[in-house]
Amino acid sequence: MKEFSLELPTRIYFGNYNVEEALKIESKWLTGNVMIVTTGRSLIKFGYLNELKKILDNLLNVKETVIFDNISANPKLEEIEEAVKIGTDRQVKAIIGFGGGSAIDAAKATAVGIGNSEKLDRFLLEGIEPSGNTLPIIAIPTTAGSGSELSKGAIITSLTYHMKSGIRGAAILPKAAIVNPVYTWTIPLGITMETGFDALAHAIESYMAVKANSWSHMISEKAIKTAGQNLLLLMENIDNHEARKAMSYASMIVGINLANVGTCLPHRMQYAVGVKTDTSHAAGISALYPAWIQRQYDVSENKVKDIMYWLTGKKILSGEEAREEMAEFMRKISVLKTLADLGIKKEDLPELIKQVTGNISNDRLSEQKDIISSIYYDSL
Ligand SMILES: [Fe+2]
């Protein structure tokens, strides 16, 4: 068994209808003005945003609750700069991320921008680690997929610099993650499957990662099995609340792997696809998955066999079979796509290949020459 260290400073609250109680316990972080960063819309429609504001307003030390809901699905640096300006003017002292992964990532970046003296784009462009002056963050996810509530990354797109990259560091680990699966009950089937597939991808990639260890393996195995069963149950009945809860759980525990182990090539390669097409994170990941899993068989045969057995109950014997079975599972949950489906053309690929940034050495395939080009071309 190889050595590893595990960092889990975020306090987890998991369960239905637990938000008010959890926020009372965490009220030490919530003094003065507090800002909710959210993607809004459906949370406003179902009354959840109002409900959260009321809970915060009733906390003893909260003076005022400021709402910033101008965050889009792939959060933009320019939107966050606006949140930082408002938060600074209103002397906000804590940030609540309320929504899907985009809202929580935007909340983290807002906390960095208000708490640190450097301009926000430097964290993104130069990879500077946010300091301990970053405002405290409480994450309340309303989807089951990103795992951002327990991760130390915030993925941001810059329109000015035409790039998608991450702000990373322990300072942006939320102080608390309040996971209430009830918020996911109203999510439509398509988004449920897409975000659920993202959680599954986190479990799979953190299992394949060079940095994986015996602890992260345990989490990956549990999450792959849970997502494999419960996404199919939700395809049959979207109102299966136990399956919803299981997906919130799987997504959350894999967040621990995101913070400690990280992901592989599909997550690095999706960023360029997202910038080019403004399609969702999960859509980009799913377009790359069949070609990527096939190649993984060449470098980690036994691990691919494990994954496919946990996911489908089948014993596969080749990379081609892994690809077919993965595609079959993705077809069953309606997330199977190609890069062409997302609007990518063959002539776009050289530009995409150049735009893959960040450390790719966590993927064993990174040692193979032209692997990025090979996966992109094979995913068209
Ligand atoms: Fe992801």
Image: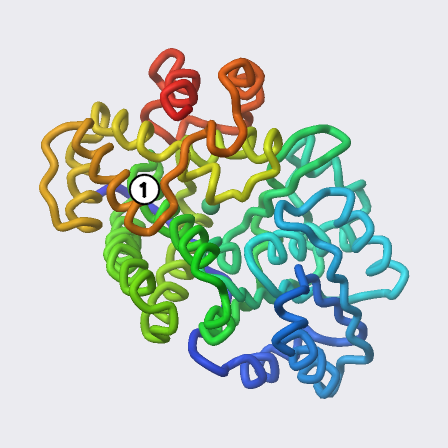
Left or right, 74 with respect to 92, comes to left
Q: Residue furthest right?
A: 89
Q: Position of residue 188 (x, y in %)?
A: 48, 62
Q: Position of residue 234 (x, y in %)?
A: 33, 64
- Residue type at mark 1 is Ala
Residue 6 seen anywhere in this rendered image of the structure: no
Q: Quadrant of the C terminus?
A: top left
Q: Position of residue 354 (x, y in %)?
A: 56, 17
Residue under the image location 51 percent in, 17 percent down? 349
Secondary element type, mark 1: loop
Q: Quadrant of the N terminus?
A: top left
Query: How many dots with numbers?
Result: 1
* Residue 21 against residue 355 in the figure, above or below: below
Residue under the image location 24 percent in, 42 percent down? 328
Q: Residues within 10 Å of mark 1 (few under 14, many from 20)?
A: many
* Disc 1 target residue: 212
Left or right, 93 with respect to 253, comes to right
Residue under the image location 41 percent in, 65 percent down? 248
> Depth check: 73 or 102 in front?
73
